[in-house]
Image (cartoon, rainbow, N blue to C red):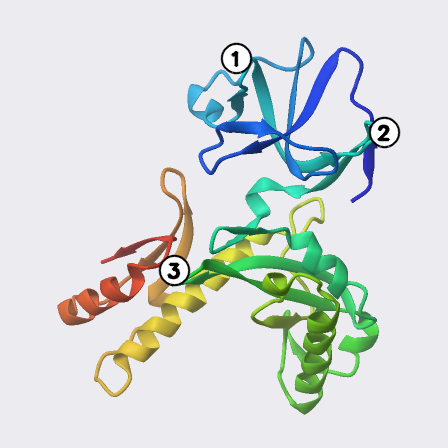
């Protein structure tokens, strides 16, 4: 992303390092990426619904209160601010923060890629690891078979996937940011204003993770849980949660709970 310029008159803006709970650690150094904070008379005082105010305020080491914009950015030596992404979109791999733009910008430079979205997929050891969904260009799609938004993985599609994967490995400079997998799509979920809707991709990754665990557990048994019985939803209270119906199979419930325990996403087994 480009520079958003200098701070507004009568408004303070700083980049700061926060801990995982959103507490102030220190102000960022020049060109160090941090959380963008603002304060001033033109900054609102908070939401009327107090529940919505959780996590939006930061108190620095001088006792000053700042509004946490949720944006990540840096301030250069001339005082200009540069946006680098959104805090909630960070992929946290074993405590290491990975900026999705680092992956997406590289993938979008490939001639067969029109758009790209990097998200985290659940990992029992690292918490999450990066994966990437790419929307292929019109020219690339014209040579492949597409059903809905999904690309049929025939020989031509597999060859293109290998090419894009090799390109990513060669050009993504941060090793930890190299996607574990790349998914080819004819289209990506978007919001009403045309922005990629990443939560849909994140929920799909959670569903695939749970389904894969179940498939391994029921292999060679009489048990079977279809995809319709594994649902990942946005709960108003709990947030993103995976809900699994086992049909009263207590042995499967116990084994599934044991397998899901190391993961960081929320789940319910009923």
Q: Which residue is mark 1?
A: 63
For image coordinates 53% across by 52% down, the residue present is: 96
Residue 244: image location, x then y, percent: 30, 61
Q: Quadrant of residue 262?
A: bottom left
Under tag 3, what secondary structure?
Answer: strand
Sequence order check, earlier mark of 2 and 3: 2
Q: CA distance from mark 1 to mark 2?
A: 27 Å
For image coordinates 46% across by 38% down, the residue present is: 20
Under tag 1, what secondary structure?
Answer: loop
Q: CA distance from mark 2 to mark 3?
A: 49 Å
Answer left or right for 9 relative to 198: right
Residue 270: image location, x then y, percent: 22, 58
Q: CA distance from mark 3 to mark 1?
A: 44 Å
Where 141 sits versus 74, above or below? below
Q: Which mark is residue 231?
A: 3
Q: Which mark is residue 78?
A: 2
Q: Which mark is residue 190?
A: none
């Amino acid at each position: 992303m480009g520079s958003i310029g200098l701070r507004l008159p009568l408004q303070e803006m700083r980049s700061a390092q926060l801990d995982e709970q959103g507490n102030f650690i220190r102000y960022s150094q020049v060109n160090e990426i941090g959380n963008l904070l603002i304060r001033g008379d033109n900054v609102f005082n908070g939401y009327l619904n107090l529940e919505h105010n959780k996590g939006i305020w930061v108190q620095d080491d001088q006792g000053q209160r700042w509004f946490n914009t949720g944006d990540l950015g840096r301030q250069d030596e001339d005082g200009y601010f540069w946006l680098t992404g959104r805090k909630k979109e960070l992929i946290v791999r074993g405590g290491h923060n990975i900026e999705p733009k680092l992956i997406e910008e590289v993938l979008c430079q490939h001639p067969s890629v029109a758009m790209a979205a990097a998200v985290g997929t659940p990992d029992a050891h690292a918490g999450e690891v990066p994966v990437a969904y790419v929307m292929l260009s019109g020219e690339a799609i014209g040579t492949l078979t597409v059903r809905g938004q999904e690309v049929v993985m025939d020989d031509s599609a597999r060859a293109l996937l290998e090419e894009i994967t090799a390109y990513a490995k060669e050009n993504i400079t941060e090793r930890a940011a190299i996607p574990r997998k790349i998914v080819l799509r004819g289209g990506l979920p978007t919001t009403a204003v045309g922005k990629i809707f990443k939560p849909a991709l994140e929920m799909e990754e959670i569903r695939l993770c749970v389904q894969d665990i179940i498939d391994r557990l029921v292999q060679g048994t009489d048990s079977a849980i279809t995809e319709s019985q594994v649902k990942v939803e946005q709960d108003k209270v709990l947030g993103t949660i995976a809900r699994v119906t086992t049909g009263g199979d207590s042995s499967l419930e116990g084994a599934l709970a044991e397998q899901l325990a190391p993961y960081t996403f929320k789940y319910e087994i009923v």
